[in-house]
Image (cartoon, grey):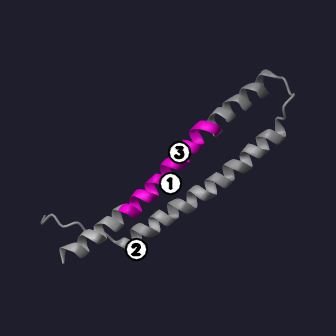
Amino acid sequence: MDGTLTINPGAATDDAAQIDSIVSQMESDMQTLDAAIKRNIPDGIQTTWSDTVKSNWESYYTADVPQAMEDMKLSAENLRLAVNQALKYDEERF
């Protein structure tokens, strides 16, 4: 190996755009699910099952989901940054 790194900028930026699209769709789907849970288990229903489901969902939806979405967005941004830096380095080399 000669230490050469080959980057396909088009493929990498397409991958980043796909990540953005997936995150956007997942955020929309999670909002739909959140609305359905709130609609189908409204406040005032006092059962152990409903309290547990709502509590677990709210914890998941307000903490885990946003963090996962941000991590995915960061991955897409990092991919774009890596492509831009590689292209900049390549231009400076020649």
Q: Could you tell me residue 80's position as x and y percent?
A: 41, 64
- What residue sits 50% from the left and 66% below the top? 17
- Locate the N terminus by quadrant: bottom left
Q: Is residue 82 above or below residue 59?
A: below
Q: Secondary structure at mark 2?
A: helix
- What residue sits 67% from the left and 48% below the top? 30
Residue type, label 1:
Lys
36 horizontally vs 44: left or right: left
- Disc 3 to disc 1: CB gap under 8 Å: no
Q: Secondary structure at mark 3?
A: helix
53 horizontally vs 79: left or right: right
For label 2, the residue is 10
For label 3, the residue is 68
Question: Mark 1 and mark 2: span between their CA atoms?
Answer: 18 Å
Count of numbered circles in the view: 3
88 horizontally vs 65: left or right: left
- Quarter of the view holding residue 92: bottom left
Residues shaded magenta? 62-81
Crowding around mark 1 (Cα neighbors within 10 Å: few <14, some 14 to 19, many 20+) is: some
Q: Quick one: which residue is furthest to the top in this view?
A: 48
Viewer-closest of 82 and 36: 82
- What residue sits 29% from the left and 70% below the top? 88
Q: Could you tell me residue 51's position as x and y percent?
A: 76, 25
Marker disc for residue 29: none
